[in-house]
């Protein structure tokens, strides 16, 4: 008998190495500076994503996450896109994934979520064949990251703190 795995669904999480020199305050200030550049695309669930240009600390963090993934999984990633979101007290994110259903060829494979300020819970929904409606809840705190297949629906639970919850979204294609 031969066995072939047809697909794989994964969720990865970890801590950003304390020796990495990312200026989180600089990243936070940069995101807040571009706060008014939120996009609204109802066809792709990209509600209120903040798009911004190149930034050295954000790019360095993106490269670090790519390298950690390759080290642990043995698979390379190619950066696809980045954005940020800000949730005020009492807000939660919309449930979404990062696929463009009309252009799957130009959709990412892996999504990383990285909190820059604040903490809450991240819920990732998935199906295990007949076992539908499963979900994984991950604590979502600063200096940590969560990665998962870009086709999985997810949402950030309610921000119960007074301070804004700020997080980065990195999308990658598999190499």
Image: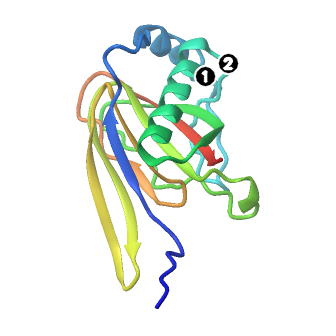
Q: Which residue is mark 1?
A: 36
Task: Name which residue lies at 36% across and 39% down.
Answer: 91
Q: Which mark is residue 108?
A: none
Which element carries disc 1, helix, strand or loop?
Answer: helix
Residue nearest the viewer, comparing 22 with 51: 22
Residue nearest the viewer, comparing 8 with 81: 8
Q: Residues within 10 Å of mark 2 (few under 14, many from 20)?
A: few
User: For the residues marked 1 and 2, what is the alpha-carbon distance in whole angstroms?
Assistant: 17 Å
Q: Residues within 10 Å of mark 1 (few under 14, many from 20)?
A: few
Label 1 with label 2: CB-CB less than 8 Å: no
- Asked if residue 67 is positioned above or below residue 32 in the image, the reply reads below
- Asked if residue 148 is positioned above or below residue 31 in the image, the reply reads below
Q: Looking at the rendering, which quadrant does residue 17 occupy? A: top left
Numbered marks: total: 2
Task: Name which residue lies at 26% across and 38% down.
Answer: 120
Which element carries disc 2, helix, strand or loop?
Answer: loop
Q: Which residue is mark 2?
A: 54
Task: Name which residue lies at 58% across and 43% down.
Answer: 76
């Amino acid at each position: 008998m031969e066995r072939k795995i047809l697909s794989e669904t994964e969720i990865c999480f970890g801590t950003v190495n304390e020796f990495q020199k990312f200026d989180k305050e600089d990243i936070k200030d940069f995101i807040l500076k571009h706060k008014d550049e939120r996009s609204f695309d109802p066809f792709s669930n990209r509600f209120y994503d903040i798009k911004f240009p190149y930034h050295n600390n954000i790019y360095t963090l993106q490269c670090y996450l790519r390298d950690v993934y390759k080290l642990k999984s043995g698979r390379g990633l190619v950066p696809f896109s980045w954005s940020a979101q800000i949730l005020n007290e009492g807000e939660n994110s919309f449930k979404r994934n990062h696929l463009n259903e009309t252009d799957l060829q130009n959709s990412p494979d892996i999504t990383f979520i990285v909190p820059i300020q604040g903490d809450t819970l991240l819920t990732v929904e998935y199906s295990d064949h007949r076992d539908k409606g499963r979900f994984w809840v991950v604590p979502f705190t600063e200096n940590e990251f969560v990665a998962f297949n870009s086709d999985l629906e997810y949402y950030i639970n309610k921000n119960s703190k007074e301070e804004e919850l700020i997080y980065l979204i990195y999308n990658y294609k598999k190499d």
